[in-house]
Amino acid sequence: MSSSHASAPLSEVESDKKAKSARKRSFAKLGQVFAPYGFLMPFIILFLVFQVFGFAFSLYLSFHQWNPVAGLDSMRFVGIENYTFSLEDEDFYRSLYNTIWLGLASGISQHLVAIPMAYLLVNLGSKFRHFMTSAFFLPFITSTVAVSLIFVNMYSANVGIINKALVALANAPGLGYTFGWLNDLMPLRWLEDRLLIKPAIAFLQFWKYTGFHLVIYISGILTISKEVEEAALLDGANFRQRFWYIALPHLRPFIFFGVTLTIIGSLQMFEEPFILTNGTGGIGNSGLTISMFLYKVAWEWLDMGWASAMSWLLFLIIAAVTAVQFLFFGRKGLGSHS
C-alpha cells in the first residue's frame, strides 16, 4: 500500500514537469514565429499612421471643403466639386503647363547629355572616369536649398556672375562682332522676366540632376560584355557604331528607370522654383509649378479639400505618363527585341 501511494505523487510530479516543458516549448515556438513581427512593428505602425492613413485621409478630404484652422467640425462634404473646380481653374492649367515645360526642357537634356557622356567616360579609362563621375555627381548630393540660393546670386541682374560673363564675352577682343549684341540686352533679369524664369529654373535642374543619371548609365554600360565589344572592334565598328548599336540598346532598361524618375521628379518639382521665385511663382506665375500651386492652396489659402483633389489629379497624371512611357520603353515598346 505504501509503495503504491508513493508512486502516485511521483507520477503526478513527472506529468507536471512534462506539461511545463511542453508549455515552454510552445512559448518558444510562438516567440520564434512572432519575434520578426515584433522587430518590424515600429516600421509597420509608422507606415500605417503616416502612409496608409495619410493616403486614405487625403482621398476622403478631396471630397470635402475644410479649413484646418476652423477644426474638424467645419469639414463639409462637397462631392466632386473640388475636382471640377480644379479642372476649370486657370492657375491650375498654367502651373501644369509650367511644370511640363520645365520637365521637358530639363529632363530631356539631362538624358541626352548623360548617355553619350557616360559611354565616353567609360572608354576613357577608370581613373579619369571615377574623377569625372564624382565631380558630376557632387551637385546631386548637395543641399537643394544651398544650390538654389547660390543660383539666386548667380542670376542677379547687377552682380550675378552669369551677366558678368555675358558682358565679358560681348566685349572680348575679336568676339565683339559675334556677341556684341548682348550689350543691348544687359542687364538680363533672369528671375524677373517671364520669358527667362523658366529657362533659369530648367538650367538649375539640368545642372543638379545630370550627374545622377550619368552614374546610372555608367553602371549600365559597365555591364556590357567585353566579348561583345571586342567582337565589334574586330568587325571594324567605329566608336559611333558601337555606341549606337551596342551600348544604346543595352541601356534600354536603364533609360526606362532614369526617365521614370525624371517624370516623377519633374511633376513634383517644388524646391528650386520656390526658392528662385521667392515663393511667388514669378511674374505672372510664369515659374509656378503644380506642386507650388498645391502648396499655396493648402497652406496660404487653407483650402485642404481643393489641395487634396489637386494632389490626386497630379497622382493620376504621373500614373498616366508613366504608363505611356512604359509602353514606349517597356518590353513590348518601340524598338524592343523579342
Image (cartoon, helix red, strand yellow):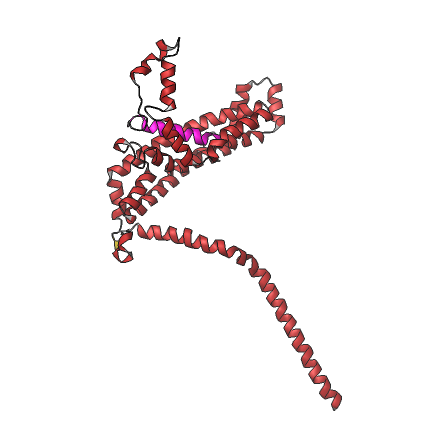
Provide residue 250's location: percent of width, then percent of height: 53, 30
Is residue 310 placed above or below 14 in the rendered structure? above
Provide residue 336's location: percent of width, then percent of height: 49, 31
User: Left of 287 or right of it: where is 235?
Assistant: right
Provide residue 333's location: percent of width, then percent of height: 45, 33
Provide residue 163's location: percent of width, then percent of height: 35, 21
What residue is drawn where x is 53% and y is 25%?
119
Residue 251 visible in this rendered orientation of the protein: no
139, 211: nearer the viewer: 139
Is residue 117 placed above or below 321 in the rendered structure? above
302, 321: nearer the viewer: 302
- Most extreme residue toward the right is 3
What residue is drawn where x is 24% and y is 37%?
90
Q: Does 316 lie within the magenta span?
A: no
User: Left of 1 or right of it: where is 273?
Assistant: left
Q: Does 196 lie within the magenta span?
A: yes
Is residue 148 placed above or below 56 in the rendered structure? above
Quarter location, residue 88: top left
Q: If the image is split into quadrants, where does the N terminus sit?
A: bottom right
Q: Magenta span covers which residues?
A: 194-211
Quarter location, residue 106: top left
